[in-house]
Image (cartoon, coloured by chain):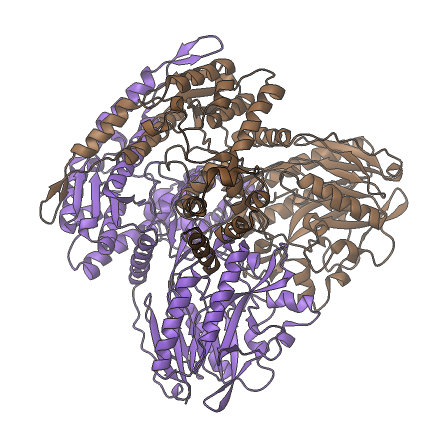
Chain colours: A brown, B purple
Amino acid sequence: MLPIAIAQMEVIPGHPDRNAATMLRMIADAKKQGAGLILFPEMAIPGYLLGDTWEQESFIRDCESYGQDIIAASKGICVMFGNIAADWTKKNNDGRVRKYNAFFTAQDGKLVHPDSMPYPFVIKTLMPNYREFDDTRHFFSLQKLARELGTTPAALLSPVSLKLGGKNYQVGCLLCEDGWSEDYEVAPLQLLEHGEPIDFYVNISASPYTLGKNDKRNRVFSAQAKEAHAPLFYVNCIGLQNNGKTIYTFDGSSTVYNENGSVVSVAPEYRESLEIFDLDSLSSRPAAVQKPEKEVAHIYRALHYGVRRFLENIHMKNVVIGISGGIDSAVAAALYCQVVGPEHLLLINMPSVFNSETTKGLSQQLAERLGCEYMIVPIQESVDHTRAQLESCPVTLQKDGTEKHLSVSSFVLENIQARDRSARVLAGAAAAFGGGFTCNANKAETTVGYSTLYGDQSGFLAALADLWKHQVYDLARYMNEEIYHREVVPQGIIDIVPSAELSSAQNVDEGKGDPIKYPYHDYLFRSFIERWRKATPEDLLVWYQDGTVEEHIGCEKGLVKKYFPTPKDFIADLERWWNLFTGMAVAKRIQAPPILAVSRRAYGFDHREAQNGPYYTRKYRQLKEALLNREA
Amino acid sequence: MLPIAIAQMEVIPGHPDRNAATMLRMIADAKKQGAGLILFPEMAIPGYLLGDTWEQESFIRDCESYGQDIIAASKGICVMFGNIAADWTKKNNDGRVRKYNAFFTAQDGKLVHPDSMPYPFVIKTLMPNYREFDDTRHFFSLQKLARELGTTPAALLSPVSLKLGGKNYQVGCLLCEDGWSEDYEVAPLQLLEHGEPIDFYVNISASPYTLGKNDKRNRVFSAQAKEAHAPLFYVNCIGLQNNGKTIYTFDGSSTVYNENGSVVSVAPEYRESLEIFDLDSLSSRPAAVQKPEKEVAHIYRALHYGVRRFLENIHMKNVVIGISGGIDSAVAAALYCQVVGPEHLLLINMPSVFNSETTKGLSQQLAERLGCEYMIVPIQESVDHTRAQLESCPVTLQKDGTEKHLSVSSFVLENIQARDRSARVLAGAAAAFGGGFTCNANKAETTVGYSTLYGDQSGFLAALADLWKHQVYDLARYMNEEIYHREVVPQGIIDIVPSAELSSAQNVDEGKGDPIKYPYHDYLFRSFIERWRKATPEDLLVWYQDGTVEEHIGCEKGLVKKYFPTPKDFIADLERWWNLFTGMAVAKRIQAPPILAVSRRAYGFDHREAQNGPYYTRKYRQLKEALLNREA
């Protein structure tokens, strides 16, 4: 019998003192419960997403020092944990000190040296260097080390030999990406299987939450356990980590796979947990029953946890939300109200002459149903003053004294309104309320920059900016049904046409609204960013020619014909949004608030971009010409 | 005789069509001038800093297609150029198509196959993965390929054999970082030297400008040429490329080193040039005379070029700058005036009750001296309205009808003023003027977030945000003396105490101003970010204990004692700024405008950071306790 404790801890990035304290507490707990071995996640001491904090030598030494505390605590229990490991005598390729993403095993106050490693720890072999991951920027891989030593990863990788309860165990130690070897030329798990049989595998991870990732992991890791005929313990952290622009929740969901590849236990999402499993009875345990859930339930949990932890991290208790009577701000309000409570939530409606009684009424209704603080701050007087001032103050060319006046167009006035609301009213009110104000942009708007910089594009956090418009509607319905169990987001808000109400051309009572046709554009835009093989106008025209646009982008059938009677219409729409997506929207995203990521590709540090302007390939231009000629 | 043309072209990132057109034009020119070989920079066709555009397969195919045009044009001339190369049958480690950063040689309309490469091009061996570079994210290195093929980089690297003018040449082909091998375990240049003697080396680069980099390159590359007894042609592009948040100028400065290691020619900075050199007469050419210049001259050229090309790229002709009578906005005004001309520059002074006659007068004087458009837009009325509105509109708790009112503190009012100026006046005026408004923040303010979000922290570009305050002053004096040859930045602006003038506590006429003591804090902050071994409070306390703070950070001697009589004072100051630098300032930088980089470490995508809050190491806390106890 070997009782193994899975310590699904919250890792606080950049705070080794707090993480070490958590670990010492959980070690003491596990000992009390009779565990012989306790497993902690990858980078449990430093955290994982730290930007270039890895370049501070004093920080690395601090992590080493806290690592020593954990090693010292391994008396009467064996402790496996992730930490940064430095070799102060060697360099990384950036010329700074050599750093490894390392898997430590400690027992009786000492490190257990893996048989064939040149260090007393296991080194991560595979370094993710896509999406939000920058492992290669800071960590020296086992592959590089093997090359430097003139040997191979296979020669360096071996199980860790443990003696526990009088019995010998061979443990296959993996770090996160080491278990996702499909696209690499080596598979660490297979390389481990060359000596004595392995009794069980441990994959310590720092794996950010992404919609659908856990299902994929269960398929991949189940197959690994089954093929190796050995149990596999997947230990993930919980918490919130970020790369500045993009914020990730870590859901935990630590999972035990038995030697048949069955999932025998899944730790709760987003909760600390310490569970103990007897190694010898895993094969006889029944498979854990995981009831399938709707995508929106996962989204809600990730957002709720992400918002809550983000607010706690920045010590913000009070939140201000500008509400328009539209869906995005209403969903944001319902979400934040769950996190901070109605007394700490101030909704502000800021009507101008263009705002309808309909949306003003819906805003009021929403506030009433949430029971939160509510304020109405009209902006017309301020907007009129700004316009008058800009048009009346003389502009004088100093070199010759020529005087002229600026003229404020209706388009300029639209943006003046948006900035008046956010940078004047919301920012001032939030400071006076002792908190911050939110950005309620969704992913479709964010994709094409359908927003005003320093206006509705601003805020301390963009919690909904990784959700397409249809996911925002799903979330409204889900919160009404499953969270509040009543219609807190009024049906009128769900039903009304999406509109900015910044001019008479956007009159909701006449059914006029946004130029984005969400049932189609949600999916078109998604193909630009989330699709594995990123689509460009060239791909779209190829599909258009083949009549397969809807199939490829995943929207409802028939929409292309409905919205775009001719190739010219289709092309004009495509170029309009592509120009914005790769043009002005990039400039806006550079200055956008941090985004809470849930999708397979979020803006910011996940999908990285340069402000290089729109581009159309040669083939696109040829296809376009052919299509337009065919039409003519 | 072998006439070799160095084609120092502007590379436009993400626009293969325009780059290929430039190359075809330069090839025709070189042919006309009798060149036998023409050399283009690294990634001449796609550009280098493209974010995740590398994931668009249609873009990669487009680059291949334009590469074919260049190959076809190699009739009567040999063409060496950089481009992306794809192997559509293989994968990168991210699972996407295999991409190489490649060096192509074309002759007679065909590619010249390097002797021992598995592809008809040379593959970049060393992948920079620090600062702004993300090579490993997208490109498969020669080292990885060697590992995959079960061989070594040495076995794959060989010179390219050329027959030119009836003579055989062995050319050592290198891509940028391949020439900077100091911190890597292999040195491609040395690996090339194992067969026939090499006649000359070509290093094609896409090397962003950084203060001091060219001097270092001359030392490194001169030594390489000398040691190899062969000339080395360094071919760099000009242009402006960016990673979204951080913008880099590419200065060209293509250089020819002869076999003695002498610099025989340097192409002009920031200008296209096509120069032809006879290979055989390089050793007899005199060393190029490079007159040493002040750092500020380099800074000015980089900023002027960067601002000019940035404005051209976004098609912006008119610029609005809010001027306060302080140094940062004055320097910005003088700089932009050189780029856009006085008719396209609108300076706006926006006084409140806290602005002195002194700074209002200096603003007017600056505008007069530049001869540009000038406007005065007072903000007091609007600020008073905002305050009154926020304090008078009732806030009602919906669940019980309790009514209260917000109260606007003097601190909140400071930020209301700053936002009123930028988000209300400047943004509106810029839109009406048909342009954008600038962010004039310097690097010291940016480091600690001494700025207001959506206020002075906003703008389309932060051109001075990579300059410390003392560099901003240098630039003022330099422009007066060397560019304008008259005092356009009034001496009064250079002499006045830096102040935000947002409250009566910041009265310039009483000599009151910013809390930042620039002669010390410029250097303290620089140690946090630009120092090779990034300093943290722990390092500062160690130095403080040793009495070596000034020596380590590089400021004037005696300042520590002058500003901080006791350890308690020193520690309080240190923690104040470290808390801001790693706290609120990170949040502000996430939403800051793009920064024009000139230093060895700029904010944004160069120095990457996470919003993780301040942290003090265990050793720091021990040192602090000891210092405070000693004091007590």
Indicate the quadrant where residue B44 lies: bottom left
The answer to whether A567 is drawn above or below residue B278 in the figure is above
**Is any part of residue B499 visible from this angle?**
no
Residue A60 at least partly seen: yes
Residue drawn at 36 percent across, 84 percent down: B34
Say left or right for B544 vs B100.
Answer: left
**Number of residue marks:** 0
In this rendered view, identify the residue nearer to me: B618 or A224. A224
**Residue A257 coordinates in the image, percent (x, y):** 80, 41
Residue B256 in picture, x, y percent from top left: 40, 78
Depth order, front residue of B104/A221: B104
Between A515 and B604, which is closer to the camera in this rendering?
A: A515
Q: Along the horizontal axis of the image, is A211 left or right of B244?
A: right
Residue at 54%, 79% in the rendered image: B112
Image position, residue B193 (x, y; %): 57, 81
Residue B198 percent across, percent down from the top left: 53, 84
Q: Residue at x 44, y 17 (%)?
A: A362
Name the quadrant of the N terminus of chain B. Answer: bottom left
Query: Relative to B418, is B566 on the left or the right?
Result: right
